[in-house]
Structures are given as C-alpha cells and as structure tokens.
Image (cartoon, helix red, strand yellow):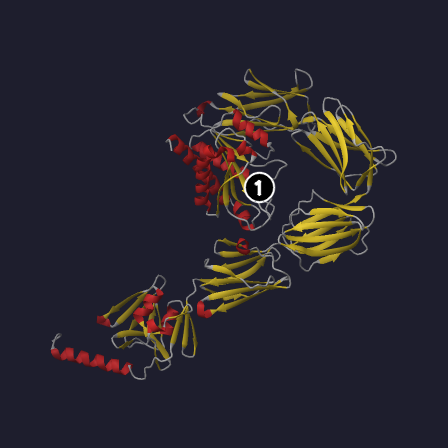
Amino acid sequence: MSNSPLRILLYIFLTISLFLSFSMDLKGENIHVYINGQDLSKELEPVLDKAVVYVKARELARLVGAEINWQQSIKTLTINDENVLIKMMLGNPYIQIGNRTIRSKGSLMLIAGHTYLPLEDVAQCLGFLFKREGNSLYLSRPETYIRDIRWQKEGQVIVVEMDNIVPYRINNTNNPARLELELEKAALADDFTDNLSNKNFYLAVTPVEEEARLKLSIISQYPIPFQGDRSLAEDGDNLIINFLPYITGIKWNKDQLEIAASGDVDRPEIMLLTDPRRLVIDIPDLMLSDFDLELANNPWIKDIRVSQFSYDPIILRIVLELYPDRYLHLAEDIRARDKIVLRTTEQTSLVDLAFGENRISFISDNKISPEIFKLKDPDRLVINVLNASRGEGFPDRIDVDNKLLKSIRTSRFNEETIRIVADLKEDIGYSLQEKVLSDGRIMNIILFENSFKEILINDSELKTDLVINFSGEVNYVIKEGANALILDVPGVKITEDYKLPAPLGAITDIKIKASAEGEGIRFEFATGEYENYKVFSSSPATSITLSLMKEEIRSSKISNLIVLDPGHGGFDPGAVGPSGLAEKDINLQIALLAEDILQREGYNVILTRKDDTFISLKDRVEMANKMEALLFVSIHANSANSAYSEGTETFIAPNKVASSQLLADSLQKNLLKELNRLDRGVKKENFYVIKYTNMPAALVEVAFVSNPHEESLLASNLFKEKAARAIAHGIMEYLQKINNGR
C-alpha cells in the first residue's frame, strides 16, 4: 500500500497545492539585497510575500560560505557554517538554532523548484546585521565587536578593545587636524561604552551597518601627532593607536624651570642667542597643545614664546627671553622621562688655572656644576663650565710635563660654555673636589687617581667568572700560586667604601692588601678545583675578567667558544624606553638566558659582562680576539627618534660579509620565527664590536625599546625567553651548517 499509485498521486496533489498557496501575491520587482555592501540580487532572486523578503536558500548559503542540506523525507533544510547550525521545515514558521528555537516571520517555500527562505530571520541567525530601507535589504556580518575605546598615557594612546583584530586602514582626509581610521567587518558591542573625548581630541565612532564597518574620526584644533602606519600597533586583540606626546605645562619651581609633557620626551637642543639674550629650546617629537603656564614675576625670564617650529621633522620650540647674565642649563641628573628640567646657573668667572702632579685646579666666583667626561684616541678629560667667562689671566693653554698630563687647553666652546681640556698620557680615573675659600669663592679640584671599585663573581656549571672593576685603565699581572690566583695592580688606591662579595664557585676566599712591588693592590683569590683559567681583558683595561674553567666540562664542543655580548652596561644605559626600561637590562637578561640554553646543549659560552658593569667596546673586542672565539654575537634593543619604528634587524660589518652573512641570516630567521615582528632585514654597518672582532660576528637588534608596544614586549619575561631561544637556535643552526660544510 505504501507504494500504491493512489498514494503517489495524493502526494503530487498536495505538493502542487502547497506550491500554489505559497505562490500567491509573490513579486520581486525592485527588491535589492546587499551583503557587505555588494548588490547580490541577481544571484539571490528575492521575492516579497506579505512584507517578508525571501531568497534562494542554496545561493544564500553559497554566498556566505555555509553548507546546506535538504532532507526530502522530512522536508527539512539544514544550514551549517562554522559558528551555528540552523534547521527549518517546509511550511513551519519555527527556526531551530543549535539547542534553541525562535519563531520566524515566514517559513520555507518552494518556488519554481527552488527552496526559498525568509531572509531577515535566517540572516540574523547566521550572525548578520540586518537593515531594511524600503525594498533594499542590507546584510553585514562583523568578524569582531568593539567592546571599549579608551585613552591611556594622558591622551597619548588610544586602545581599541575588540574580540579579534580585523583589517584596518587610515583614510586620507587632507586635514592635519582630522584623522580617520576604518575597521572592516566590525561593529559596536551592545555593552560598548562611549567615553572617547579628552582634553586635546574629540573622537567619534560612526557605524556603517550596511557594510559591517566602523569609522573612528579624531578631530583636534591642532595637527594630530600621528605617524602613519608606524603609529599603529597590535597587542593581542587590541588595536593600539599611538600619538606623539604633547606639551602639558611650563612652570617655575624654586630655582628651576620644568617643561612637562604627556609622554616621554627626547633630549632638547639648546642655543643661547644675544641682542636680546634668549635661550632657544628645540624639543624633537613634541606637539603643541593647550598647556599650563606658571611664570609670574620670574627673576630670570622676561618673556616666553612657544610654537610648533616644524612638522617635518616635528619640533616644538620654546624661546625664553632672559635677564642679563642669566642662564639656564639642562639638568642631566633628572630622570623623569616626561619632563625637561633646566636649572639656574649664576654667571661666574674662572681664574687661577693650575696643575700639580696628579691634579688640575681653578677658582670660580660661585659653586658650579660642570659637565665632566672622558674621550679616547687620544685620552683626554673634558670639563664644561656653563654660564662662565674666563677672568683676567686665565690661560688659553698650559704645557705640562709630568707623568699624567701633556697639556691643559681652555676656550669659549659656545656662547654659554667655557671648556677646559686636559690632555692625558693615559686613561686614568678622576674625582671632583670642592673647597670653599675664605673670600667665599670655590676652589675646584680635579684629582687624577685610579681606584679599585668592586669585584663581581658569577658561577655556572662550566666556569666561575671574576670581574674586577677600576675607575680608569690599569695594568696588571696575574700568576698562579698554591691553590690561589694572584692579581697585582700597580698604581691603584683602595677606596674606603669598597665591598667584597662572598666566595662562590671555584673562588673560596678573597683577600686584598698592598702590592708587594710597592704602590698598588694585590688581590689573592683562594681557589678550589679548576682545570685552567682564561683572561678575557686587554692590558691596560678598566675591567679585568677572569674565567676559571671547571674540570668536568671537557668535551668536543669546548673549543668552539661562543661569545655573547650584552650591549651597554654600568653608567651606559643604552636606549631608554617610554616607561623607563633600560636597554642594558634587556640585553643582559636575554644574553643570560641564551647562555643557559647553549650551555645545556654542551657549548662553551662566555659573556662579555655578567652583570650591570660598563665594559668598553675595545675590551669586548679584545676579549673575543684573545680567546680566539668561534663566533661573536652582540645583543641589543633598538631605538629611534620616532616612537613608531618597529621590528627586528641584524647587522654585519662590511669587511666581514663572507664570514658573517650565514650567521646573521640564521639569527634573523630564528628571531622572526620566534618573535613575529616586522622583518627589517640583515644590514651592513661598521659597528665597532663586529668590525674589529677576528671571527664571524653579528649584532642583533631584537626590537625597539623606543616603541611603546615593543617596549612592553621587551619587558615581558616570555618575550625575552623567546628572543634568547631564537639567538641560541640561530647560533646552533649556523654551527651545524658550517660543520656540515654548508
């Protein structure tokens, strides 16, 4: 009976009846369906019945990338995409979505042999935004929802918090005070919080629902400090929009001028002009804005002018008109990154320049804060005295013939500075001493003497490292005694405040006493068992590095010595990031992690420094050359004037391309693989440590500490571990290639 002709005829009759009932009042003229802004009416062939728009089910599924299945036996249509499963029955107004059911405004229809479905309800079940304007229907499906947009760092950074990163672009508005950012396939979440404007910028968010697109419009009364694509960064699922900092205030605080900004500022260029007396302060990468000014009745400054001096490059100019004989100098000891501080400097006159066996001296009318620094090749000490003049009889030059000094030269270096240069016969330490004379003037004494500063010890499975630091270059002699290493350093004094570390590793005791050969210091390092020792410093040197190699580390890989060079250290911080992260600390942490990885693999590794110690470039090079290292890798964090420079790059010296290219390529490849940063490539540069080392050498710039986003990455332990692993694997990959003859 189930296959009887009567039953078949009945089924055909019911089907035709159903078709005819659904075909009443159908029309399709002037109905347009847009999906993500594209008119797809021709493919979907929409029809209208009782204000409900229907489209071809199979075409809709194809266009949105979903699977479709028709089960004839139960008259059920299934639509499945990666996010949702939808079921509908012919003639049934209910739609099953996963485990829940909703009622639709329409139901499945059969028209001319095609299955049609109610567009609005089905589209919304599939996650599309739906908008209808007359007979035009707009569908758009966001791939992300914006949860929040917030300002950080006093309006210097915009954080767009979303479910996931989608394509975005910057539109050209031809208006420097207006910025427009578009995010594709994005919509505002229901819980989006509108808290967008700040002191300097008005930010509006405009949804383009028809295309699942968002416009972020930023408007300011000043040109917006935006650096194109370099201003955009990603942090997880957040889009970060970085702006250059802007000036927030200028105020007089006791006897100093403070210039405050919304973010980190670079060191300014300062010029003194006359007629009238003006101090011109040019601050790079700083934008003009409304700012607070507190300079009422100032005894130093007559007038002040602030302007955006240049937009390319970006320079903020501050002009201070000073009273006669007044001057302000940059306070070098102020570490606040969002502030520039200038201190008052009384006009002073310098007289009575003189020298002794181990000193030079001069008298000033009042207390001074000179800039003092050493230069090499040839060795000389430079003393800059600000807001000063040379008094009567103050000499241009004094020829000296003693064991330390060749000559003393003086000059007016610029409008505000008297420069004193002491030409030295050797690199030696110094200290500044002051003595108040009976008439109130100040005797300034530069005392030349080398002194012992500190001892540092690091112990590892392979070796015990000793680092002995001095204030200047010293000569030394090392010899082995009975269960001891003896280091004699002539011509060095012991300061009263020195500290000795606790014995560690192969070092069992430390004693310091007067040298047996006369003036100087003898260091006696009592030792336990060790195989041999190596000296990784030239003579003379400001830092002496010894390694006591342990007996248990003999292996075929010991001769393949790897030198890792953590850049900067000690009083040389390297680059400093927006939040104060110092490059020297990053470099050392990565180097120590890389050393640990390589040592676990059985390689012999030494670091040019194991702690926060200053090691000269010359000493780093000579350390590697003296121990005949197999390769040399210098580790750095990059920096640029722009806060938006980003990525990873590796350098080799032009004179060593043949030997170093393979090493650099391997390092760069592994860094990119681990860190997923912009590839800035392998480049050639005459950096000292890679130019003058005798072995294959490369210098890696892991990421930009000057970029706020990449600084945050460099502060992360996980990122530093990845960088270390990349460097270690790059080295091992290189060694494998050369050992295999590749």
User: What percent of the width, then of the height, locates residue 511?
Assistant: 62, 22
User: What percent of the width, then of the height, locates residue 318?
Assistant: 72, 53
In this view, 114 is above or below 240: below
In this view, 340 is above or below 444: below
**Quadrant assignment for the C terminus:** top left
- Tell me: 417 left or right of 110: right
Kindly identify the residue that appears in the image at 70 percent across and 42 percent down: 332
Which amino acid, by three-letter code, is at mark 1? Glu
User: What percent of the width, then of the height, locates residue 97?
Assistant: 35, 68
**Quadrant assignment for the N terminus:** bottom left
SS at mark 1? Answer: helix
Kindly identify the residue that appears in the image at 35 percent across and 64 percent down: 84
Q: Residue furthest bottom?
A: 25
User: What percent of the width, then of the height, locates residue 458?
Assistant: 54, 30
The part of the image, by quadrant, that contains residue 582 is top right
Query: 317 and 446: which one is in front?
Result: 317
Query: 301 and 10: which one is in front?
Result: 301
Visible residue check, residue 87: no
- Tell me: 288 left or right of 17: right
- Tell me: 290 left or right of 487: right
- Residue bearing mark 1: 583
Kindly identify the residue that appears in the image at 42 percent across and 67 percent down: 36
